[in-house]
Image (cartoon, rainbow, N blue to C red):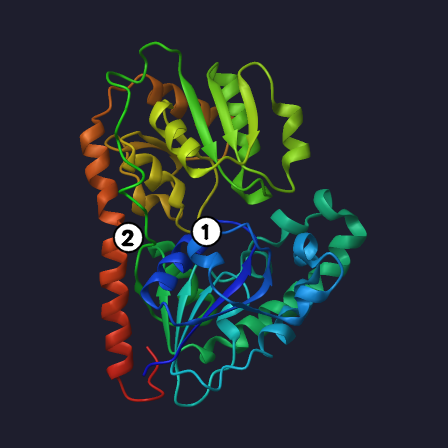
Amino acid sequence: MLRVALIHDWLTGMRGGEKALEVFCEMFPAADLFTLVYLPGTTSPIIERRSVKRSAIQWLPMAGTLYRQYLPLFPIAVEQFDLDGYDLVISTSHCAAKSVVVTGRARHLCYCLTPMRYAWDQFDAYFGVDRVGKLGNMVLRPVLARLARWDRATEGRVHRYLAISQYVARRIALYYNRQSTLVYPPVDTDFYSADKMPAGPASSTPPPKFLVVSALVPYKRVDLAMMAARQAGVGLTVVGNGPERSNLEGLAGDGIELLGWRPDHEIRDLYRTSTATILPGEEDFGIVPVEAQACGRPVVALGRGGALDTVIDGETGVLFADTTVDSLATALTRAAGTDWDAARIRRHAEGFSRSRFVTEIEHVVNDTLSAPVGQRW
């Protein structure tokens, strides 16, 4: 019997990585689940039903909310997981999960959400002087540089990398010097459907109202969306929570609102009734744009990163070139004035379905297990 272990960085909410993990849990119902920190009640019922094996970080003060403060301890913690009894290890990793230690007979597949951004190329977005102060920036820079060196040194613990987008595949090649297999994340295109979709052009009454669904963290650039909506004179609803919320509250008002987080069925209704969903920052993939398109609605996205895999300019949305208020405001105006083909948008999104993901993962797993022990791709 094949013994499988699933490794995830932390379980504190349902984002794109957790939705991939959810499908892995369905595919491997007997698998054991390991994570650095787990907050019960923050993930889906499928994940919640698992007995989750947690690291020692779980027991540090206020780890459930301040786990990011323990980032320097992640390498030690993730290497303590006992994986000796497993034949197949699947990590869903954007931080440290990919660096678990497996036995010589086991195969390790990493579903790589991205090489860790803050250690490699986005340090200033997370730990710039304007965010942590001059002293904090000076202290953290060598810490994150050391973490990047560890991340690079442990790339060989993975037998095969799976990239969530062409953009991430390039990052894996750049930082790990490894090839990868492209497998787009799963989107529940059955749940996110075009039913009850508003008919007619986006510019018809009621007035244009755009949507952002996002964790409120710096690199997501929710502030850019809020400022652009104000300049374009359109409404904007922001769904999400995170450490940036207090900073963003000063940009709300006059048709721009912060709702906090909402359950999936409410988000689906917002997708269906919004003029378009905005992806204002550079994403590794961006599952939100595909969910919106599955509901038959267009997306306004920065023309970089994963959006180039998921949004077709002029057909399923609008790609804007620069992270400036003017560039995004112009794109919002263009989206509001376009008569979109909802059926065409929906068909495009169906190419990212959960069933497609399962088929591709099954193929990769079988291919990997049939290869000689120790082979790396």
Q: Who is closer to the viewer here, 61 or 303?
A: 61
The quarter in which the N terminus is drawn is: bottom left
Q: CA distance from mark 2 to mark 1?
A: 16 Å
> In front: mark 2 or mark 1?
1
Tell me: 161 left or right of 252. Answer: left
- Position in image of residue 208 (x %, y %): 40, 16
- Position in image of residue 122 (x %, y %): 57, 53
Which residue is the site of mark 1? 44
Q: Residues within 10 Å of mark 2 (few under 14, many from 20)?
A: many
The quarter in which the C terminus is drawn is: bottom left
Tell me: 287 left or right of 115. Answer: left
Tell me if residue 198 comes above or below residue 175 in the rendering.
above
Seen at 31% across and 44% down, the residue is 310
- Position in image of residue 286 (x %, y %): 40, 45
Q: Which residue is the extreme one toward the top?
A: 205
Q: Quadrant of residue 350?
A: top left
Residue type beneath disc 2: Arg
Which residue is the site of mark 2? 354
Q: Residues within 10 Å of mark 1 (few under 14, many from 20)?
A: some
Tell me if residue 212 comes above or below residue 168 in the rendering.
above
Secondary structure, mark 2, is helix
Q: Which residue is the extreme one toward the right?
A: 135
Mark identifier at residue 224 = none
- Position in image of residue 57 (x %, y %): 67, 67
